[in-house]
Image (cartoon, rainbow, N blue to C red):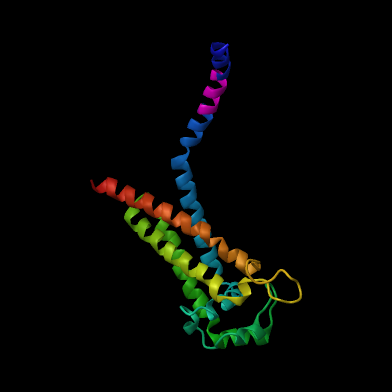
């Protein structure tokens, strides 16, 4: 009976192992896809920093950050009276952002973010440079995640509902926390680029 059972289950077990072997063979494809995804997100998001609505949107994050608030001319929370909804143009609010330095700061961040994406994209030819890009992305992701601590708008405000404050992330908070994934991906691509460089120099 035992032999009959083993004979019956062997084809099924063998089929399952083939599926797992096929999945295991996707590691290099997965690494390339992960790196490509990082490049697309960084170049796209960095490019959007040249759009006024995106520049306006990051003001609460930057203005409340002890690491970055010095780049603006007006202190927090003054910005709250001058925030525009996405797609809405308010000339008075736009003028306030002009005097705040909102747009030059956003353009600078955009250049940095796009540059990190380009560095990571150089992995096939210059893995040592791509490793630097991944390291810079780790620093960027850690900075972004710090906004969860420093930005009041990252959490649902107390406006009557019992679900407010920690752990109830607002729309802005939900965008920020996704950088946990980017942080993990940056460590993986850093290690992979460093290994590729070391293999080439051996």
Q: Nearer the viewer, residue 135 or 29?
A: 135
> Which residue does the image show at 50% across and 78% down from the upper left?
105
> Which residue does the image show at 52% across and 88% down from the upper left?
73
> Which residue does the image show at 69% across and 82% down from the upper left?
90
Residue 44 place in picture, x, y as percent: 54, 62
Residue range (magenta): 10-17
Residue 152 place in picture, x, y as percent: 61, 76
Q: Dividing the image into 4 quarters, which one contains the N terminus? A: top right
Residue 97 place in picture, x, y as percent: 59, 84
Position of 142 relative to 130 (above/below) = below
Q: Nearer the viewer, residue 161 or 82?
A: 161
> Which residue does the image show at 47% across and 36% down from the upper left?
24
Position of 25 relative to 33 (above/below) = above
Position of 14 relative to 161 (above/below) = above
Q: Nearer the viewer, residue 9 or 125?
A: 9
Q: Is residue 126 left or right of residue 19?
A: left
Residue 33 seen in the figure: yes
Residue 115 place in picture, x, y as percent: 43, 65
The quadrant in which residue 168 appears is bottom right
Q: Main secondary structure of the magenta part?
A: helix
Residue at the limit of the structure toward the right, as seen here: 160
Residue 126 seen in the figure: no
Does the magenta segment cover residue 13?
Answer: yes
Does the magenta segment cover residue 119?
Answer: no
Tally the marks. 0
Q: Dividing the image into 4 quarters, which one contains the C terminus? A: top left
């Amino acid at each position: 009976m035992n032999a009959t059972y083993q004979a019956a289950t062997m084809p099924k077990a063998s089929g399952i192992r083939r599926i797992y072997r096929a999945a295991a063979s996707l590691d290099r494809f997965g690494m390339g896809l992960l790196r490509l995804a990082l490049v697309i997100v960084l170049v796209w998001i960095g490019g959007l920093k040249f759009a006024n609505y995106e520049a306006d949107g990051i003001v609460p994050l930057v203005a409340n950050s002890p690491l970055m608030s010095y780049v603006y001319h007006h202190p927090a929370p003054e910005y709250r009276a001058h925030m525009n909804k996405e797609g809405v143009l308010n000339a008075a609010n736009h003028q306030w952002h002009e005097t705040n330095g909102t747009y030059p700061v956003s353009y600078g961040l955009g250049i940095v973010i796009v540059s990190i994406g380009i560095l990571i994209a150089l992995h096939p030819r210059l893995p040592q440079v791509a490793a630097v890009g991944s390291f810079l992305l780790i620093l960027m992701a850690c900075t972004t995640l710090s906004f969860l601590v420093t930005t009041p708008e990252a959490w649902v405000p107390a406006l009557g509902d019992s679900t407010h404050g920690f752990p109830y992330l607002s729309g802005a908070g939900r965008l920020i926390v996704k950088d946990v994934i980017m942080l993990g991906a940056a460590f993986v691509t850093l290690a992979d680029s460093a290994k590729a460089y070391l293999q080439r120099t051996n």
